[in-house]
Image (spheres, rainbow, N blue to C red):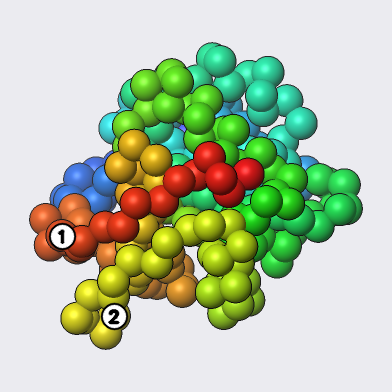
Amino acid sequence: MPASETLGALRDLAPLFAFYGIHGLVEPLGFPQSSLRSAHQAQTLIHDARVPFKLLIDTFHHHLYPQAADEFSQVEVADIGLVHLSGVDDSRPREQLTDAERIMLTPQDRLGTCEQVKALEARGYQGCTLLSPSPPSWRNGAKRISSAKLSRASRSSSATAPETLTVQRARRVTIFPTPDDEVAYNRRRINGGIDHELTPVDCAHAG
């Protein structure tokens, strides 16, 4: 998709999001075939469109873009609205990885996920952070979480509520079985309907 089309889409969506009280997030995907690969490019488009959207930084997609680390110093931390975490222990080159390889964090993580989080924190990021593995790894998540020394939080009495965790410095991390669960959760969070008890998690031991 040409940048001009992306700009037009952002401008078209902004009033709709404002009307429904939705906070817009733009996620660069990092894949070679993606028309929006880098956070810096996404930030530039948001600024050019003059819309109140923020960036969604995904540690997997960030890793897929070879120049991500070099360009990231140009990204304003204040423009980041959400961070997604996942791990990869597959040994294939980054250009061959797909979303199916995303797993829970393990000591064998090749994405440098915890290093990415620490770098963001060092630059002042204090926003929300969510675990975002692929569905197959979620189904096997109990073993993955244990190996990464993540502590499970108590489940909410609501049958549809996700498990909620925190990482070091009280960072909120939420595991969602499906994207629909994440959408529903964020709608409730925006409306002030989320207040779970959290169990500390030490990200420093996961990578």
Query: Please, is residue 63 above or below residue 162 in the view?
Result: above
Q: Position of residue 134 (x, y in %)?
A: 60, 67
Q: Position of residue 80 (x, y in %)?
A: 40, 32
Residue 176 in sight in this render: yes
Which SS class for mark 1? loop
The residues bearing labels 1 and 2 have C-alpha atoms spaced at a distance of: 14 Å
Q: Which residue bears the numbered disc 1?
A: 195
Q: Residue furthest bottom?
A: 159
**134 or 179, which is in the foreground?**
134
Query: Please, is residue 78 above or below residue 156 in the view?
Result: above
- Residue type of the residue flagged with mark 2: Thr
Residue 160, label in figure: 2
Q: Position of residue 29 (x, y in %)?
A: 62, 46
Quarter where residue 157 is shown: bottom left
Q: Mark 1 packing: few (<14 Cα in 10 Å), some, or many (20+)?
A: few
Query: Please, is residue 175 above or below residue 2 in the view?
Result: below
**150 or 2, which is in the foreground?**
150
Residue 138 in sight in this render: no
Q: Mark 2 packing: few (<14 Cα in 10 Å), some, or many (20+)?
A: few
Residue at 88%, 53% in the rendered image = 92
Q: Which badge, 1 or 2, is on the more N-terminal residue?
A: 2
Residue at 57%, 27% in the rendered image = 41
